[in-house]
Amino acid sequence: HPHIHTAVPTGGLALLLAVLLWAPWWALHGAPLTELSGDQDFQLFLQRNLEFTRKIRGDVAALQRLVCDTLQLCKEDELLLVRQDLDIAQAPLEQCHKRTFQAETCFSQIRAGLCVYHGSLATIRALLPGHAGLVDTLQLDMANLSSNIQQQMEDLGLATVTYPTENQDPVPTFSSQFHHQVGGFFILANFQRFLETAYRALRHLASL
């Protein structure tokens, strides 16, 4: 591909990046996409887990509304200054939207991220003790999604990396109750963005 040397105004650059990030993903590691896209089981897996991911996103959105209603923490831009002082879990998903998209590394990153957020949801349980049941359901769904992906990778003969079921990172500790609340807010916001990317990756594979 020829390199683009012209100066691009900022808006144009953002657009260019968006186009590059979501350009067609060319190859699945180890199997041509056409071969996989016709695979009934793989299509079934994608449809089922798109539903699952949608449900998880709904649960996270419900927790975000509770944090907004209960703690009056609703707008991300108002909290960005506080955020700089906090060590908040974030899981990378760049393998799921690069031009060199590979199902193997994308699925592995989704599973690793689910493991990270699974652990950090303990922060939310502590903030919303009256809604522990919702957090439990969410964690159960996340564990199921992760094992579905692992199972599918094994079925496709893709290398799987097994992440420990218990999150190795300790639950973040915050210096004050307010930091704890803001930390919880950002864990949910980051997790929601993570899920959106994972959803787009699954949806893209389903549309091939």
Image (cartoon, rainbow, N blue to C red):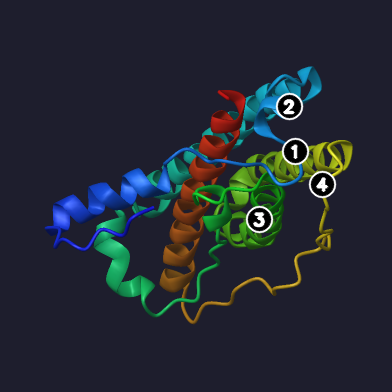
Q: CA distance from mark 1 to mark 2?
A: 7 Å
Q: Would residue 93 be visible to someone looking at this image?
A: no
Above/below status of 89 relative to 151: below
Q: Nearer the viewer, residue 41 or 110?
A: 41
Relative image position of residue 144 (x, y in whole percent): 78, 39
Q: Check disc 1 and report the residue beneath it.
A: 31
Q: Amino acid at mark 3?
A: Gln
Q: Residues within 10 Å of mark 1 (few under 14, many from 20)?
A: some
Residue farthest front in this picture = 2
Label pair 1/2, CB-CB below 8 angstroms: yes
Question: Helix, strand or loop at disc 4?
Answer: loop
Question: Helix, strand or loop at disc 2?
Answer: helix
Q: Give whichever of discs 2 and 3 has the lower sequence position.
A: 2
Report the disc number at residue 158: 4
Q: Nearer the viewer, residue 86 or 200?
A: 200
Q: Amino acid at mark 2?
A: Glu
Viewer-side label of 1, 3: 1
Q: Give whichever of discs 1 and 3 has the lower sequence position.
A: 1
Q: CA distance from mark 4 to mark 1?
A: 9 Å
Question: Helix, strand or loop at disc 1?
Answer: loop
Q: Check disc 3 and report the residue beneath it.
A: 109
Q: Would residue 188 be visible to someone looking at this image?
A: yes
